[in-house]
Amino acid sequence: MAGKMRKDIKAGQKVSIVLKKDQRSGALTEGVVKDILTKSPEHPHGIKVRLEDGQVGRVKEIH
């Protein structure tokens, strides 16, 4: 699954994330990366990002 490695994600990229409120359902939200919030090079649940519209979640897919 994409989104676990920080090096694969860049600002301006289109991604699908899971918001905190959607973790149980797994519903994806699409948007463009503004900031990468995870500092470590990888994360088992996905790298946490902020989208340009301000939503924060973990990356599940990179488009």
Image: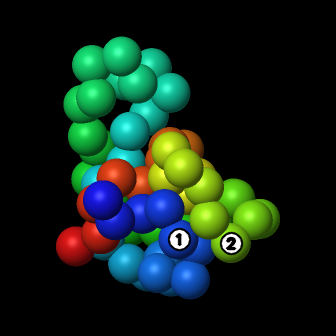
**Amino acid type, mark 2:** Pro
Label disc, if present, on residue 41 of the rendered structure: 2
Q: Residues within 10 Å of mark 2 (few under 14, many from 20)?
A: few
Q: Residue at x 45, y 20 (%)?
A: 21
In the image, 21 versus 54, the foreground residue is: 21
Q: Residues within 10 Å of mark 1 (few under 14, many from 20)?
A: some
Left or right: residue 57 versus residue 31 is right
Q: Are marks 2 and 1 in contact (CB under 8 Å)?
A: yes
Position of 49 relative to 34 (above/below): above
Q: Residue 1 is drawn in which quadrant? A: bottom left
Q: Residue at x 54, y 50 (%)?
A: 44
Q: Is residue 1 visible?
A: yes
Residue 59's x, y, as percent? 42, 55
In the image, 22 versus 12, the foreground residue is: 22
Q: Is residue 50 visible?
A: no
Residue 3's x, y, as percent? 42, 63
Look at the numbered disc 1 and give the secondary structure of its residue: loop
Q: Residue at x 48, y 62 (%)?
A: 4
Q: CA distance from mark 2 to mark 1?
A: 6 Å
Look at the numbered disc 2 and give the secondary structure of its residue: loop
Label disc, if present, on residue 20 of the rendered structure: none
Residue 46's x, y, as percent? 49, 52
Residue at the right extreme, as displayed: 39
In the image, 12 versus 45, the foreground residue is: 45
Left or right: residue 61 versus residue 49 is left
Residue at numbered disc 1: 5
**Amino acid type, mark 1:** Met
